[in-house]
Image: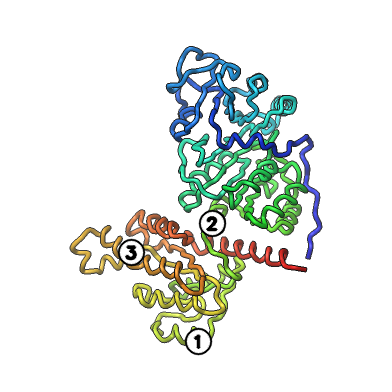
Amino acid sequence: MKVALISFTTIKFKKMTWDTEFEIAFNPKTVAVVGASRKTPPFSDFVVILQNAGFPGRIYPINHKAVGEEIHGLKVYPDLVSVPEPIDLVTIAVPLHAIPSVLEDCIAANAKNIQIYTAGFKEAGDEEGIALEEKLKEIAERGGLRIVGPNCMGLHVPAAKLTTWISFDPEPGPVAMLAQSGGHAGQFVFDAPLHYVYLSKVISYGNAAVLDCIDFLEYLSTDAETEIICMYLEGISDGRKLTTLVREINKTKPVIIWKGGTTDSGARAAASHTGALGGEMAVWDAFFKQTGAVRVDGADELLDVAMTFRYLRHVASNRVALVGGGGGNSVAGADICARAGLALPTFSEATLQELGSFIPREGSIIKNPIDIATSMADLNIMMRSIECAIADPSIDAAIFILSPGLFFLKAAIDPASQMTTIQEAVDKQARIILDPLIELDHENPYRKPLVMVFHESLARFLPGQEEQLRQELLKEGIPVYYSLERASRAMGKFSRYHEFHRKTDAPQ
């Protein structure tokens, strides 16, 4: 059933369409930092951050009070006009009331690609802040300035070693992030590599006075380095254009959106954070139904879903097998999967007979979910159970719940462990268990993926082991989640995304 498009609350000011001349800002050869400090602040500054990131271009510190000096080993310039070559990107970190004069300097220097870190504009909610943002927009329109912000962290491009963050993983990847919140953008920058999610571009755009999410979506839609687009939104300027754009992009590049300000309290907070007008939730409900964009409700879920789209192979439908341990856990697991929109079909008679031929009857369940708690330490039973589940014709993917502490227990009772350290014994046991799981995922003839959930109850025996094993599996392209709730939720959204496109893209 088609859903009628509902009009979004629109912010009333002129917006720019995407200007391709801004694209040099994502791979600049020259960056000027206006407001460069003689002393390194507690959280570093943008000159040091670029140096630490290994930025290969030229950095120009601008500080009219430090002319004739050096800042972090670099010659200081009094203003942008004095810089001896064209400036590809200007980072502005000066007090609020100095912003208009710096923007006039940008016009004079023909430096039109700008990111403004300074806050205190319309998000402050007072007349002065609102007036200053209006002044900023007037100068930008008059001078043709392309501005990210204000009240933002700007651009993060690992491939270009361009960032405003103190530390980041420099390995580039195919996932982009657009965020009105600098904090959420930063959390994504720091946490994404822990999920083996590597980044193409992260854009923290704050108040969106000139360029906003629609402009950046237009860019990312054609960016060859971006395959998946994540977004944190508080408010938008043009709901109809966003709907049209996301609907089209989402056909080839999944768009994952965390909408902030979905409650009255959240909407008030968004207004004071970025000055955003968020719109009614009924409007956003219609938006997601029309576009097929993937809706998430928090930072953890955003990362889980991004990881799922990055690593989970396409599945035919939402039918899964759940393999784990404990009767109560199996019942709870079935409920969790069902609530997330996953189906746990009954195995075929042939599969049930096969499972019954090697799984002990005592303390086990051979239906779906499969409970092998009493036999989990037997590698043959563990692997055959997963293989049978994947082979069943009613199953599209298998979720295997494993406790990393199992490696500790097997190492502890292994006589050979008396001849070595417990860590070495655990590493050996980990390889014995992980290698066949990786091989099953990569080489099973049914091309059905394996998804892992780590049960933490025994992980306390060897702190740090769980994350090490998780990274090993992620490196092999196998999604690993911290709980069945998180795995089911992400897989359910992944399945519904593909179901949406099977229906909407099918010939009428």
Observer-nearest of 479 and 281: 479
Q: Position of residue 93 (x, y in %)?
A: 57, 26
- Mark 1 or mark 2, which is nearer the start of the sequence? 2
- Whole-angstrom CA distance, mark 2 to mark 1, is 34 Å
Few, some or many residues within 10 Å of mark 1 (<14, 14–19, 20+): few
Marks 3 & 2, CB-CB < 8 Å contact: no
In the image, taking residue 276 as reference, residue 488 lies left or right, namely left
Observer-nearest of 123 and 66: 66
Few, some or many residues within 10 Å of mark 2 (<14, 14–19, 20+): many
| The image quarter in which residue 251 lies | bottom right
Q: Position of residue 52 (x, y in %)?
A: 43, 33
What residue did someone put label 3 on? 431
Say whether residue 272 is visible: no
Q: What residue occupies the far left of the structure in this picture?
A: 419
- Whole-angstrom CA distance, mark 3 to mark 1, is 31 Å
| The image quarter in which residue 90 lies | top right
Callout 2: SS: helix
Circle number at residue 310 = 2
- Mark 1 or mark 3, which is nearer the start of the sequence? 1
- Residue in the picture at 36% in, 58% down: 460
Q: Position of residue 377 (x, y in %)?
A: 34, 72
What residue did someone put label 1 on? 350
Quarter that holds the C terminus = bottom right
- Residue in the picture at 60% in, 17% down: 81
In the image, taking residue 110 as reference, residue 303 lies left or right, namely left
